[in-house]
Amino acid sequence: MLTSIRNSSVLTAQFRLGACRVGNATTLKASQLFSRKQQRFAHTPTRNAGFKQLTSADIEQFKSMLPSETILATPAVGGSSDPVELEGFNADWLNKYRGASQLVLRPKSTQEVADILRYCNENQIAVVPQGGNTGLVGGSVPVHDEVVLSLRNLNKIRGYDEVSGVLACDAGCVLEELDNYVAERGHTMPLDLGAKGSCHIGGNVATNAGGIRFLRYGSLHGSVLGLEVVLPDGTILDNMSLLRKDNTGYDLKQLFIGSEGTLGVITGVSLLTPRRPAAVNVAVLGVSSYEQVQVAFKLARQRCGEILSAFEFWDASCMGAVLHHHALRNPLSSEFPFYVLIETSGSNKSHDDEKLSELLEELMEAEVVEDGALAQDDSQIAKMWTMREGIPESLGKTGATYKYDVSIPIPVLYDVVGDIASRLEAAGLYKQGDTTRPVKLVCGYGHIGDSNLHLNIVADKFQDKVTDIFEPFVYEWVQSHRGSISAEHGIGLMKRDYLKYSKSSPMIDYMKRIKSLFDPKGILNPYKVV
Ligand code: FAD
Ligand code: 2HG
Ligand code: ZN
């Protein structure tokens, strides 16, 4: 029996003090939305003068295509909606990017999406597709006055095959609701992320979202079987295949996965949902160094490879923020420089329990891990996940959060956190523990199993003076280690000018050619990605 891993009664007693589930991103956004003034950055692209400015005649046209309750138009364009109603569509989750759209359209069918796009294309009206608006790179909100095309009313499940586990649904279905639906049928969505209560499956596909199950189920490039996409000229590409195998030429759907709304509007998604694991175990471990985090990961793969479903880590600064903002208690006996969350998922509980216990004992005996807590029931599992998934929300409550989502080889993955902290210190903007400086926290966490670090820098506000310390430095750093400047959040507006750090110029050139093939007039999500 493992003695150092805290037993259930201790864990239960501590957790009883008020843990809560990570908040729905929409809820956070609503409460935070106008509490901080959004900054315009020096590099905000200027408005493309070729795009038409909306008139009341355009609004009349949209009224002839759509039910009136699906249109939000302000008096500035001849409508009657209060501009406050549009604020939530103009500001991103981070409250870092804000557009000035005067028109939001919320179509209820693929045909309505096609009618809108055809009209916009013919009239050179710029459009930004929007899902749950949880994106973290400024891709989901207008830069200037682009029309917001919200997919939230396209939210029906189209069909489910319980034998194959193939789900077909509208793009505006919320990820968590889909997971609840397939859970009732013994399956699970192949992706899971902290924003699941708000993000749409269409947004997930458009960003090629990764998340905490990537280690087990891999990329959406593998799970997505088919897409229905409306092109900027109104053409509906019906590629809603329900088949796992389909080798009939070019796999066009792959181009839209991760295209961030720049090539077409995704209106339907079909994807493979795996069987829901019958047995799930979660443990949180305290680790004294990043080197030991790596040792723990190596051993976890060796001992539990076939049942390992997540291996996440975070540092002490993240833990401080999440414990503070979620009223959680640390389940471990003391504080550690690093924390690891291990999850196993399988079909045989006693087999998995035994394998995980053996791993944990080995980690403790080898002094790789200094203390750990093993969840004893679903409620403890949820609380442990809150410690990890609640980090972005907690940092957001701490201050304006600059986010870098990078892939770097695991051995050097955490080094960039220290290097950024040193640069900020040298500039006098940051000193660990000194809250009077503009930068409060420099911290790292992420999906270590996927070589994916989330470097977050929390400051009192967004300002170029701070950004200039770590941009383009962080991208140069990543490039020098042959990493990727975006592991999972995408390019959006934030990284558009830095794409060259991860893609060669011939590749960028081909990306631009693909963009002009699908969207020759450039109306779809302009100023983003390329
Ligand atoms: P939006 O934010 O609305 O849009 C994102 C981009 O996709 C935009 O460019 C938009 O134009 C485009 N788009 C949206 N819908 C469509 C559509 N139907 N057709 C065409 N283009 C479209 N991301 C991860 O990868 N892994 C994580 O673990 C993760 N965790 C997160 C945790 C939190 C708390 C938050 C706030 C975000 C997290 N994200 C994560 C980022 C974000 O949630 C994901 O990128 C998500 O997939 C975005 O979905 P959405 O519906 O909110 O899309
Ligand atoms: C996560 O893994 C998300 O929690 C968000 O990808 C990361 O906010 C971030 O930097
Ligand atoms: Zn992530």
Image (tube, rainbow, N blue to C red):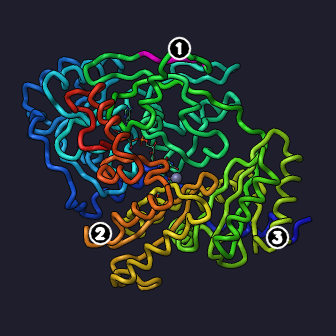
Label 2 vs label 1, nearer the camera:
1
The quadrant holding residue 302 is: bottom right
Q: Secondary structure at mark 2?
A: helix
Residues drawn in magenta: 238-243
Kind of residue indicated by mark 3 = Met
Is the CB of the residue bearing disc 2 within 8 angstroms of ligand 2?
no
Q: Residues within 10 Å of mark 3 (few under 14, many from 20)?
A: some
> Tag 1 or tag 3, which sits nearer the N-term?
1
Q: State the CA–CA distance, disc 2 to disc 3.
A: 43 Å
Where's the C terminus, which quadrant? top left
- Can you identify the residue that label 1 sits on? 248
Kind of residue indicated by mark 1 = Thr
Where's the N terminus, which quadrant? bottom right
Q: Position of residue 19 (x, y in %)?
A: 61, 62
Is residue 9 shown above or below 64? below
> Tag 1 or tag 2, which sits nearer the N-term?
1
